[in-house]
Amino acid sequence: MRHIPSLWAAIVLSCIAALPGAGTAEPLVSSLHLYLAEGFANDHVVVEVDGRKVLDADGVTTKKLTGLAMQIAPVAVQGQRSRVGVRLPRKGLDAAFEVDLGKGSHVPISIENGQLSHSVHRQIGFM
């Protein structure tokens, strides 16, 4: 009967070792959700995440009813931090920022007072 606790410990440890990514140095894969929100008016927008182009779209316009121009398809990223770059070539706007996925993975991007701005949220909702 003395071996039962050590048997349970061995079972638990083997279950943990069988989990995907357990015992490896592989970074966590997360989804980053980007939204083009307020202030877009028939714009050409280029968005990059960690150096990968995820959007190159023309005619991006905010819908007044929802305050949303476009929801970009979720982007798979590795680790807890991701670098996002946004360019509006015709308007001469360019911004780059880092997202800490521990604080949230939903990032609305807007144009406010002639500048690109963003925020980070755990959840987000549009009409």
Image: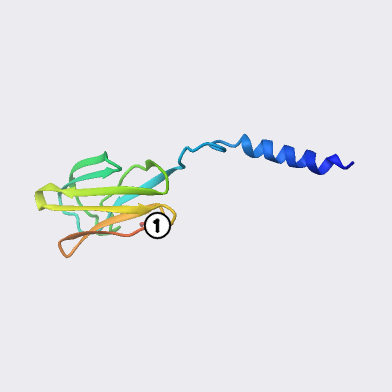
Q: Quadrant of the N terminus?
A: top right
Please tell me in which quadrant of the rendered image residue 53 appears: top left
Report the residue marked by disc 1: 124
- Most extreme residue toward the right is 1
Position above or below: 14 against 71: above
As drawn, is 49 to the left or to the right of 111? right
The residue that appears at 9% across and 49% down in the rendered structure is 90
Image label count:
1
How far from the left and from the top, in percent, is residue 83? 30, 48
The residue that appears at 24% across and 45% down in the rendered structure is 47
Position above or below: 22 against 83: above
Please tell me in which quadrant of the rendered image residue 64 appears: bottom left
Please tell me in which quadrant of the rendered image residue 111 appears: bottom left
The residue that appears at 38% across and 47% down in the rendered structure is 32
Q: Quadrant of the C terminus?
A: bottom left
As drawn, is 114 to the left or to the right of 20? left
Tell me the SS state at disc 1: loop
Mark 1: give few (<14), some (14-19) or many (20+) Cα within 10 Å. few
Name which residue type carries label 1: Ile
Position above or below: 47 against 66: above
How far from the left and from the top, in percent, is residue 120? 36, 58
Looking at the picture, tell me which residue is in the foreground, 61 or 78: 78
How far from the left and from the top, in percent, is residue 49? 30, 43
- Most extreme residue toward the bottom is 113
As drawn, is 94 to the left or to the right of 65? left
